[in-house]
Every structure is written in C-alpha cells, then in structure tokens.
Image: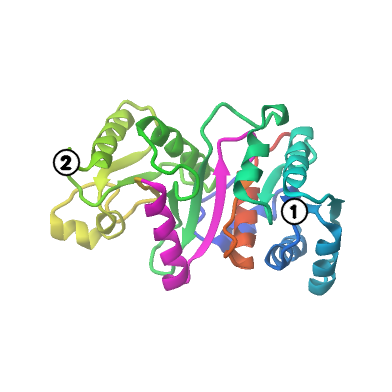
Amino acid sequence: MPELSATITSFNQIFDSIHRCSTRRLAIAGAGNSEIITAINESVNKKIVYPILVGDRNKIQPLIEKVGLQGDYKIIHITGDEEIAQKTAELAKSGEAELLMKGKVPTGTFLKAVLDRKNELRSGELLSHTAVVEVEKYPKLMLFTDGGINVAPNLEQKVAILKNSLRVAGALGISQPKVAVLSAVEVVNPKIPDTLDAQQLVEMAGRGEFGDIDIAGPIAMDLAISDYAAQLKGYHSKVAGEADVFLVPDISTGNITVKALIYLAQAKVGGIIMGASIPIILLSRSDTAEIKLCSIALGCMVVEDKD
C-alpha cells in the first residue's frame, strides 16, 4: 500500500497515489473482452500494472491489436473456463500475480478456483465485496459492502464484512472511518431483523472490537448522507451526514444502490474482494472500461507490499 499524507477522496487521487507504488502484477482470468483490454491498455499506459492475460490467444490478440496495447504484457494461452480460472489462481499461489481479476469466466468457476485449497489463497476469513463510489454531490468516497458476494449475511458474517471494508478504508487513508449500518429505519425493531444486527454491531464497536471507528446503526440512508435530514429528524451522531462505510443489510440492497448511483448519478466506481490472501477484482459483465480501470486502481491501492 502507498503511504498517504491525507485521506483519499476521489479516484483521481487514487491514481496519483499508486504512481508512487511499484507496478503490480495483475492476472486476468478470461481476458478476451474488449472492455477489459481497453481498461488494461489504460492501466499499462499509466504504468500501474503488468498484465498477465489468461485465456484464448485467438480472442485476446485481435483485441490487443484493436486498442493498440503497447508496453509489457504476457499472454498465457489456455481454453476452457475451468482451466483458465485454475491457471489464474495458480499464478497467485506462485507469487507471479499480486492481484487477480475475473474476466470472461463464470463467477462461480472463478471463485471455485480461488477457494480451492490446493491454490492456498484462503486466508481463513470470509470473502466480501466492497464497492468504492465517487459521486459529485458527496464530499468523500463512499464504501458500500457487501453488494457482490454474501447474499443474506448473519451477524457473524457482517462482522467479517465490516472488517474487510475497514481494511479498504485504511488503504484509502481514512484513519477513523464513520460506519453507517444501514436499515430502512433508525430505531431497533424486532420485526426488522437487520436492526437487531445493527444494534449488536454498535455494541461490539463500543467494546473496541473494530478499532478506532465511529459507528451508527440502525440508520436510514438519508441520515447517513445528509446532516440536514438528521437535523430535521433530531438524529444526533458523528456518522450522520458524514458516513464513509455503508454496511448494507443484504446483497440486493448493495447491488441496487451502487448500480442506481452509476446509471443515475454518473458515479465512478471501483470494486474489490477482500478476505483472500490477495485482493480480487470481481466485475459485472455490464461494467464499463472505466469501472474496470477504477477497480484495477483500487486493487493496486490495497495490495500489501511484500518487499
């Protein structure tokens, strides 16, 4: 991770910061996709990654020629989704790759290879996804978790999800993250189970189990992002209107929220999976080259230096 003198508040600042890092070795499982190669081309131009393109050379090479990819890269010619995923995971196991990225292979196939014990990428922690979102009308980056992996997490899983997202926050220089444990309401209601989880997470944070953070929950989205809304409702918290991390109650909430911000608020987004021995970039098939590029940059931010 780069050493930061201030909190990162935009993707432009992320790109500026990773220029001070060594070039990261990124292995892509199934790289035969035009949006992926476009993002890789930008990443190589910015000198942030050395790409290892795993997949069918006959599909990858024409795309490389189309975008005019220059600089150093490597193609490992393999066909078959399972074989591609397995080879990509092996590159991480051997240390040849510091980052993994899912390309044109099914998510289940890719994660099966990542979690295969023989590839030694398990860390003993839960895998979870954090989406880092930049929108014009919010003064800081927003970290939404988990809208990509865990469908309906229980309390124990939410603890692990929160800890993973706090690692991402730390990589972005957020020294005392403000965490909003989101719900539809801001009061504990036994008929809304996620409010009970929120209450327990706040109690755990009060015992210091998450380190130096401010946390509020259950808290509705309007209160988490708007101090004005909090004032109108008489809601008092250090988190109100200032949230950094948004812990969502389930995968649908996180997924819907982030996609709405992308399409309606022109948000810049990068996503990363934490919990394995190295960061993993897992993307939607509809994600643009810009989202893929931002995700690569985010991955470079959270890679642990092993020098």
- The residue where tag 1 is placed is 49
Give left or right: position of 264 versus 65: left
Residue 43, compared with residue 171, is above or below; it is below
**Mark 2 nearby-residue class (10 Å; few <14, some 14–19, many ≥20):** few
Q: Nearer the viewer, mark 1 or mark 2?
A: 2
**Residue 270, magenta (yes or no):** yes
> Residue drawn at (39%, 36%), measured in percent from left and top?
158
- The residue where tag 2 is placed is 189
Q: Position of residue 14 (x, y in %)?
A: 59, 56
| Badge 2 element | loop
Q: In this view of the protein, which residue sits in the foreground, 290 or 33?
A: 33
Q: Position of residue 175 (x, y in %)?
A: 45, 42
**Amino acid under label 2?**
Asn
N-terminal of the two: label 1 or label 2? Answer: 1
**Amino acid under label 1?**
Val
Give left or right: position of 261 versus 268: left
Residue 53, compared with residue 169, is above or below; it is below
> Residue drawn at (58%, 63%), measured in percent from left and top?
291
| Badge 1 element | strand
Q: Is the C terminus in the top left, top right, bottom left or bottom right quadrant?
A: top right
| Residue 232 figure quarter | bottom left
Give left or right: position of 236 versus 296: left
Q: Is the N terminus in the top left, top right, bottom left or bottom right quadrant?
A: top right
Extent of the magenta region: 250-279
| Separation of marks 1 and 2 at Cα, in angstroms | 48 Å
Is residue 212 visible in the rendered image? The answer is: no
Q: Position of residue 273 (x, y in %)?
A: 56, 44
**Mark 1 nearby-residue class (10 Å; few <14, some 14–19, many ≥20):** many
